[in-house]
Each structure stands twice: as structure tokens, then as C-alpha cells.
Amino acid sequence: MATQVFNKIHFRNLKGDMFGGLTAAVIALPMALAFGVASGAGPAAGLYGAVLVGLFAALFGGTPTLISEPTGPMTVVMTAVIANLTAANPDNGLVMAFTVVMLAGLFQISFGLLKLGKYITMMPYNVISGFMSGIGLILIILQIGPFLGQASPKGGVVGTIQNIPNLLTNINPIETGLAILTVAILFLVPSKVKKFVPPPLLALVVGTIISVVFFSNVDIRRIGEIPSGLPSLQLPYFTPDQLQLMIVDAIVLAMLGCIDALLTSVVADSLTRTQHNSDKELIGQGLGNLASGLFGGIPGAGATMGTVVNINTGARSALSGVTRAVILMVVVLGAGSLTAQIPMAVLAGIALQVGIKIIDWGFLKRAHYISWKSAIIMYAVIGLTVFVDLIAAVGIGVFIANVLTIDRLTQLKSDDVKAITDADDAIVLDNDEKEILDRAEGRILLFHLSGPMIFGVSKAISRQHTLLNNYEVLIVDLAEVPHMGVTSALAIENAIQETVDTGRQVFLVGASGSVKRRLEKLGVLNIVPSENLLMDRKQALVKAVSLVTDVNINGASQNGVNNQTRIDTLIKGR
């Protein structure tokens, strides 16, 4: 039972897991502080989120080497949640925001229990790319104020953009210089140095030391001392007026956290050559966010950078994630005073660099070469994400991408709908079948379908049927159809019903499995006489030709007798 509940923890790789956890903790510290400040919940909330999400996801998740903590995308959403709820309810808005984090955790647990893990990441890449690039832009825009040495303007992205002239007029040169130095260190630190010191930690230490040594007498905005000790419990709180908004925000956080975590799990799989458990991972992520919200932490998800570093430094089990959480807890409990002098501008520089890295530059450069439609969808999702709404961006992007995909599939599958009246129309028949069909002289319409019949193919079915009206017998061949949608089944029904209503014969061939059940439920099989429900196309062709021949000759003629003899021979086989 323990192996089903807990993540894979063992002590066979103790050194690698301990060192991986230590390295991941060193990287997580500056990021947690930066994201906590950026979200508006404070640096302590960032640390609590890093500890609690990381601990519970490591213990109960489904990816042994995954490192979970506050991430850029989750921070962007949390920033909007806090801003909206505190504006609506200044006294309890922050507590309500933590309640949203708890709800998001519960949603994630539900997704895992419902086995929805495999569906979470089934989105077109251009939508995911546009969404992530949009989040990166939001994170960059929100750092403009702190980067220039001022508080972030109200109104989120739009408010910040509108206030850029005022921000530039009141720029704080010293804080802006520290922010620029931070970004420069993050981007320009040599690879040899990166092996020993993570760039975010180096930038945090260097920026803080310079601010203390050279600008101790200058009024610089700093994060202040973080309260030491265990966090206080945040009981769920909501008001009827804000409950709907809170639920929607929680769904957005939950979905984004699931996508973020599972995509990172795929990265971990490729590095460790293992296979994660998506549903179990969602439960672990949900428990982590539930715990984080209960103790005043911001939400988190699988973090790609922390996970890659964790694996590359030797981690192979969830013991690394537990080690990382314990080390960060020690910082929270006893080293809060050491963070007091960290300049806000340095944290803004770290968050800004994260935003730059979140943007999918590689796909942005190539999207228009691959497909203009794909590029337009990506840019539309970016615009909607930045200026409208995150959930609307994903919903509209997925809808448009799916419509275009369905249109393309429909065009391809329409080629598999063939109305055949003679042997020269297509090559789906063997020699005997071609000979039988030739003898019908165009009086038999063989309706041949192959492959899955999605709803878009129904137009092709109707079009092919209406093109040819001069026939006496209709044969519908479904032997090569593994799946038939309701819309296509109704199109088939219309063709059969129209044929029957005009007094012509219908044969239905090869309907089996789910296709047969679908036609049975729609009542299509009741329209066709039972003796005309066949599994062999050749037998249907022979019977159809027999009917056509009888009508044609009105009795016996020498030619008709010869034809019937030939047909009987074909029935028995050559």
C-alpha cells in the first residue's frame, strides 16, 4: 500500500539525492523570494510555497525527480488573484487568495482521482507556446515598476503600460542600476562559474552586498526581515459575492499547475529514461497546493530549471525533493533575518529574467515558416493572455486550433468516401468484384467508406450520394470503417432512407463492432431488410447484379442465362 500512496523513495542513491536536493534548494531560495514579492503576498509566502508544494509533491507525486515550487506562470495568475480579491475586499482579500490556492489544490486532486492526467497536456503546441510566451510578457511588464525603483502601478498589465511615462520620469537610478546588474549577472555569468554557483543565487548575493557596502545610507526598498518560525494557519474564507470568481480563478490555477507539472515531468522522463505517473503526480501537486494555501504560501508546480539541475547533480528518487524542502524549512525557521537587506530591485531583476526565459523564442522565430495559420493562433493567444484573460486565451486558442485541425482531417478523410458505379472509378475492388460491377452497367452504386468517419466527413457522404441518382441498387460498404461518429451515421441513414423511399434496394456490408452498435442505436439497421445485411462485399455485389439483371431482361434470354451462369460461378469462387 505504501508504494501506491508515496512517491518512489529509496536510499540506494543517497549521495546523489542529497546533493541534488541541496543544489535545488540553493536555486529555489532566490526564486521563491522573487516570486513571493512579485505575487504581492510577500517573500515569506514564496518560501512557504517552495517548502510545502515541494514537500508534498515529492512525497505523494508520481515523478520521483520532479522539483515543485512557485513558478513564473503560477505567480502571474496568483498576482492577478491577489489584486482582484484585495481590491474587492481589502480586509480579507489576501486570505481569500490563499483560499483560492486551496481550491486549486482540491481541483488538482480531483483531476488525479478522475484519471484525467493523460488529457491535461493534449493541447496544440502553438496554443501552449502562445500561452507561455504571454505569461512571460506579463511577468516582464509587471517588473517594470520595481525594476525602475518604484512600486508596481495598480491595474496590472494595462495599468503598468499606461504608467510607463510616469515610471520613467521618477526612475530611481540606484535601484535600476542594481536591477540591471542582476540581469547582467544572470545572462553573462560564465559556464564554468555556473557549475559551482547558480546564477540567481550569485546575483542575489552580489546585488545585496553592493547595496549594503556602497549604498547603506541611501533609501533603497528592501524586502525586510522575514518572520522566523512556523507559518500560521489560514482558514478558508470566502464571501458569496466573490465565490464564483474564486472558483474560476482556482480552476485556472489548477489547470495551469497541471500543465506546468506534467510538461516538466515529461522533461524528467527524458533525462532519467523513466515513466512518470500523471494521475498520481496531479494528486501530489494538489496536496502541495492545498497545504501551501492552508499555511499562507503561494501556489507552485513542477519547475523545469530546478528539476533539470536536480537530475544533473545525481538525484534519482523523491528523497531529493524531500531534502530540498527540509533545507528550505531550516532557512524559514532560522535565517529570516539574513534576507532583510535584499533589495527589491534585485528580486525584480531575477523575476524579469525568468519572464524572458519563459517566452518561447525558438518557436516565435520559426512559427511563420511552419504555418501562417499556426503563427496567427500563437500571436492571438499571446495577445489574449496579456490583455484579456488567461482562460479565455487558452479556450479560444484550443477551439480555433481544433476547428482548423478538424477541417484538415475532414479534407483528408473525404477522399476515403467513394461512390463507385464502374470498375474504373477506384481500385478498391478485386478482379471478380470489378467484373461483377461492370456487368451492372452503372445501375449499382457502391458506396465505399474507409477509416474513421468523423463528423466533418458527413458533408462528403451527402455530396457523393447526391451526385449520382441514376442507380437501382445501393451498396454501402463499411467493412473498413473502425469508428463512425453520430453525424456521419446520420448522413449514411439519410442516403439509405432516400434510396428506400424511392423503391430501390439497399445492401449494408461489413458493419461490425462499434459501428454496428451505433447504427443499431440510431435504428438504421431496421431500414435495411435483414437478408441485405451482409459481411461480404462480393456476395452483396452478386445479389445486386442478380436483381439488376432480372429487371433488365424481364425473364429469360440467352444473354441473361449466360450472365446468370457467370454470376453463379463467381459466387462459388473461381
Image (cartoon, rainbow, N blue to C red):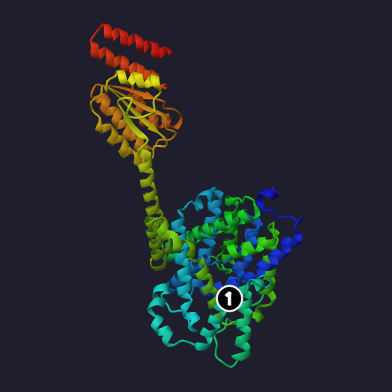
**Element marked by disc 1:** helix
Question: Which residue is found at the position 30% from the left and 7% from the top?
Answer: 561
Quarter of the image for residue 388 reads bottom left
The residue under label 1 is 188
Say which of 357 and 152 sits in front.
Answer: 357
Q: Position of residue 184 (x, y in %)?
A: 56, 78
Position of residue 228 relative to residue 363, above or below, is below
Q: Is residue 5 left or right of residue 558?
A: right
- Visible in this render: residue 66? yes
Quarter of the image for residue 244 reads bottom left
Q: Is residue 472 left or right of residue 357?
A: left
- Visible in this render: residue 41? no
Q: Name the residue furthest bottom.
A: 217
Say which of 569 and 355 sits in front.
Answer: 569
Q: Position of residue 175 (x, y in %)?
A: 53, 85
Say which of 202 and 384 sits in front.
Answer: 202
Q: Position of residue 326 (x, y in %)?
A: 69, 67
